[in-house]
Image (spheres, rainbow, N blue to C red):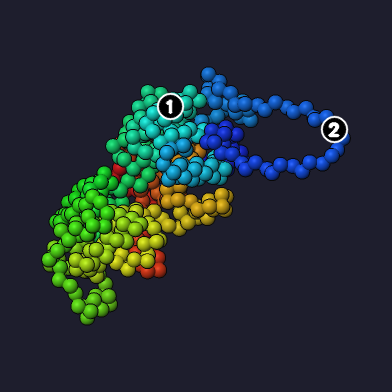
Amino acid sequence: MTQKSGLRLLAIIAAATLSACGTTSTPPPPPVVIDLPPQVAPPVDPVEEPVIDEAVGLVPPHMEGRQTARVAILLPFSSENSGARAESLRLLRAAELALFERAGSNLLLIPKDTQGTTEGARAAAMAAFEDGADLILGPLFGQSVTVVGQIARRAGIPVIAFSTDTDTAGNGVYLLSFPPELEVARVVDYASRRGVERFAYLGPQSRYGMAVNNALRTNAELTGASLTREAFYTGDVEAMASASSRLARGVFEPITPEEALELRRSEWVPNADAPFQAVMLPEGSTRLRTLGPLLISQAVDPLIVRFLGTGLWNDEDLLREPALHGGWFAGPDRASHQRFEDSYEAAYGSEASNIASLGYDAVALAAHLEGGELGFSREAIEDPEGFLGIDGLFRFSHSGVIERGLAIYEVQSNGFREIEPAPQTFDPLAY
């Protein structure tokens, strides 16, 4: 593909950006009182406040007279959930970093607080419209995306949201995220090309789990394979153990130490006689580190059955669990993401989260579109050649769902080894 032009450096950020998100600095300590003759304070110039021109929208004083492109970013800054508040701050910081590094001086970023509720999302979308937003980035949660999308469509404002709920996409709403269906499709395709014909599913009976299960079934059938066994659970370790038993009890015979040694010496090949040759485990963190050993206790050995995962596996804490070694999952280019993490930490003195890069890529994309002839039009956003971001190649379909170029990684004791690189261009026939 040809890398898009139009990404330019930006030297300033609107004062309205920081005030809108509620960022404050730590007040200085009180001054030391010294007995001096009284002095007359010099006159203080009044502070210029941003104004809203009814014809063009929000106009900060330092941007008067410019052809301003207004980009609102809607996030749950005051959500009751502390995790959502923390993630909102990281997304905003990443967006500001992109504003400095990638945007021109005509781009104004306007943060709005959705409060983590649908009512707050509706108010934030209306405020963005009143400020003259040309593009909306966010919100983060699916229900909020639905509400914002309804308002944005009536106003003719495109939305690039961060939700993974594909039901919210379409008709001018695009999802800049990592839907689990995309990750499942990639790893199933790879496993099928390695000879896997029978898949199994072991995971939660949640919205996320069901999305993974449906994608596993659909993509297995597309490759000529099938989903032969599945077990769901709702709850913690006891429920997970019961589901593991239902999936695999009496299915496999334990392998001997001699057989294990021989298997470790040779390249993995799917067992033609196995009831299933790969099992999808859509969990992460502590729950995944629990699930792997539970399967091994039922004689489902990773030397025989390949463990598969989603983007939840992209967590280096999982390297400590031997049961997961050899497992495969799909993810973005780690080298590119590491460069972003280094830049983020240098700027803010803290670590970026796994999804903070979405904030960066959203603003970088906005800067690119603003510099193009088609602006923020659907035609520009749905460019079939796609865009190159922090997390690699991506593009939006007409349905608003994202397509990404993902790599395949294998979990090893010393890190994630890339076993198949991400594509560098998109197949136009697949669009």
SS assignment at label 2: loop
Q: Is residue 158 left or right of residue 273?
A: right
Q: Nearer the viewer, residue 388 or 270?
A: 270
What is the three-letter code of the residue carrying label 1?
Answer: Ala
Labels 1 & 2 near each other (Cβ < 8 A) = no
Residue 318 makes an appearance in the image: yes
Instruction: Name above or below for residue 121 compared with residue 303.
Output: above
Counting from the top left corner in percent of width and height, residue 80 is at 42, 38
Give whichever of discs 1 and 2 has the lower sequence position: 2
Residue 361 makes an appearance in the image: no
The residue shown at (37%, 66%) is 320
Which residue in the protein does label 2 denote? 38
Q: Nearer the viewer, residue 67 or 34?
A: 34
- Disc number placed over residue 75 in the picture, else none: none
What is the count of numbered marks?
2
- Disc number placed over residue 123 in the picture, else none: 1
Task: Choose mark 1 or mark 2, whichever is in front.
Answer: 2
* Quarter in which the C terminus is drawn: top left
What is the three-letter code of the residue carrying label 2?
Answer: Pro
